[in-house]
Image: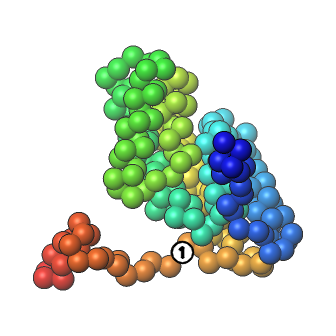
């Protein structure tokens, strides 16, 4: 049993090569959330949503993660907002509706390959916080775009990271679902 305990405490994240990389990640989070907070203060819009803090961790500390790429950040939040709006329209606010929203958001993000874990919290924030639909759309989508824009600029400052990751050609194994899609695209 103790042998299996190591699996729970093992750190799988690669070691940072330089302290500057870790410090730069922290500064990126400070700047990104600081700008969102400044805009929130100036406009009265609730741009300091808790999921944005988690997004900042991915964008600034793990920029190579597929979960931190712009399509995943913006697309994941879009999916979560859309699902939240539908549920808020047809079902009463409460923990059951929020839980259903999280489950549906996860499934749809995974199917669309737009998974962004912080976006999974949007149904909770939107449904239990009773955000007005327009405020939800504007706050979440503008906040996601703002954080991605800050990350793009931030990763151009040394020590540099390639962000976003360059698009690559899809690789498929014959007989897989993706091979059928790739083959049908070639015929066009």
Question: Where residue 47 sits: x, y (%)?
Answer: 63, 41
Of residue 133 and residue 125, the one placed in the foreground of this image is 125
Quadrant in which the N terminus appears: top right
Left or right: where 99 falls relative to 46:
left
Residue bearing mark 1: 165
Question: Where residue 167 sits: x, y (%)?
Answer: 45, 78
Compared to 42, does 162 lie above or below? below
Of residue 65 and residue 144, the one placed in the foreground of this image is 65
Question: Which residue is painted at 67% across and 61% down in the image?
Answer: 12
Left or right: where 107 falls relative to 157:
left
Of residue 120 and residue 138, the one placed in the foreground of this image is 120
Residue 156: quarter of image: bottom right
Question: Which residue is painted at 37% across and 81% down in the image?
Answer: 169
Of residue 136 and residue 3, the one placed in the foreground of this image is 3
Residue 155: quarter of image: bottom right
Determine if residue 150 is in view. Answer: no
Q: Of helix, strand and loop, which one carries label 1?
A: loop
Question: Which residue is painted at 56% across and 72% down in the image?
Answer: 164
Compared to 175, does 71 lie above or below? above
Determine if residue 169 is in view. Answer: yes
Left or right: where 83 falls relative to 77:
left
């Amino acid at each position: 049993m103790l042998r299996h305990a190591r699996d729970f405490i093992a750190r799988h994240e690669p070691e940072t090569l330089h302290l500057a990389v870790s410090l730069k990640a922290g500064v990126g989070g400070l700047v990104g959330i600081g700008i969102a907070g400044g805009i929130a203060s100036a406009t009265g819009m609730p741009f300091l949503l808790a999921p944005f803090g988690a997004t900042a961790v991915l964008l600034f500390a793990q920029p190579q993660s597929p979960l931190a790429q712009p399509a995943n950040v913006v697309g994941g939040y879009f999916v979560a907002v859309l699902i939240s709006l539908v549920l808020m329209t047809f079902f009463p606010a409460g923990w059951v509706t929020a839980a259903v929203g999280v489950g549906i958001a996860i499934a749809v993000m995974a199917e669309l390959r737009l998974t962004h874990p912080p976006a999974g919290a949007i149904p909770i924030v939107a449904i239990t916080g009773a955000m007005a639909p327009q405020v939800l759309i504007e706050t979440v989508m503008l906040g996601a775009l703002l954080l991605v824009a800050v990350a793009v600029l931030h990763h151009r400052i040394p020590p540099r990271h390639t962000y976003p990751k360059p698009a690559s050609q899809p690789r498929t194994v014959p007989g897989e679902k993706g091979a059928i899609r790739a083959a049908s695209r070639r015929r066009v």
